[in-house]
Image (tube, helix red, strand yellow):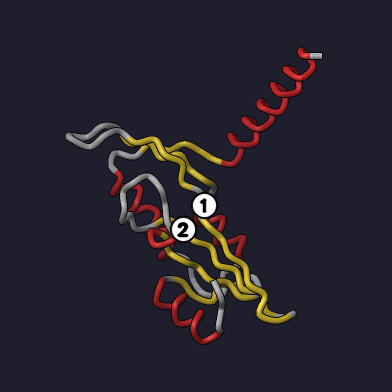
Amino acid sequence: MKNNHTYIFLLFFLLGLHLFSQESSKKNYTTFGAFLTEQNEKISSIENEYSIEKVKEIMGSSIIVTIPKVDKMKPLSQLFKQPEYSNEFKQNPEKLVLILWYFSTPKDQNGVISKNECTPILFVNGKVKGKGWAFYTNYRRANRLMR
């Protein structure tokens, strides 16, 4: 009986490991700034009316960022989800608002990514309506989106 539990646990562990490896890739950067530049260039290339699928294609899947030790900086190996967060609001039966948050601006440097360190991309009915904090804040106020 005990062996059956061990095999079941091992099967689920291997399945989970396989699923995790499918959803993320690993990429080496020379500096953290190089990663941030690439991330922000991707975000900048997103235009209004792009579909959710197009944005996810541009931003790519989750990525394990690895950076070697440089001078006094410690080496880094960290998973960045693409997107880090998502929120969905249904304003009425015909209007679905989705917000995807992509890491773009480190602030706390504590290893925990907050929404304040991300750029929001706002979709209405599956199409980009706008991006960035100013757009998000104005849209949220004008449309009374509750957090």
The amino acid type, in three-letter code, at marker 2 is Tyr
User: Is label 2 in a helix, a strand or a loop?
Assistant: strand
Which residue bears the numbered disc 2?
A: 102
Tally the marks: 2
Q: Which of marks 2 and 1 is nearer the N terminus?
A: 1
Q: Where is residue 51 in the image (x, y as percent from the top left)?
A: 61, 67
Residue at screen point 76% across, 23% down: 8
Q: In terms of secondary structure, where does tag 1 sit?
A: loop
Three-letter amino acid code at disc 1? Gln
> Residue visible at 72% across and 17% down?
6
With respect to residue 110, does 120 lie above or below? below
In the picture shown, does residue 31 fall above or below 82?
above
What residue does disc 1 label? 82
Q: Where is residue 56 in the image (x, y as percent from the top left)?
A: 56, 57
Q: Is residue 71 above or below residue 109?
A: above
Labelled pair 2, 1 in contact (Cβ < 8 Å)? yes
Which image quadrant: the C terminus?
bottom right
Q: Which of 59 and 100 is in front in this view?
A: 100
Instruction: Answer few, some or many: residues within 10 Å of disc 2's Cα (few below 14, many 20 plus, some between 14 and 19).
Output: many
Quarter that holds the N terminus: top right
For residue 96, side relative to residue 63 (left or right): right
Q: Distance between the residues labelled 2 and 1?
A: 6 Å
Q: Is residue 66 above or below residue 99?
A: above
Is 74 left or right of 19, judged from the image as shown? Answer: left
Depth check: 63 or 142 in front?
Answer: 142
Q: Which percent across, then down, holds residue 90?
A: 67, 75
Q: Percent position (x, y) of residue 141?
A: 49, 83
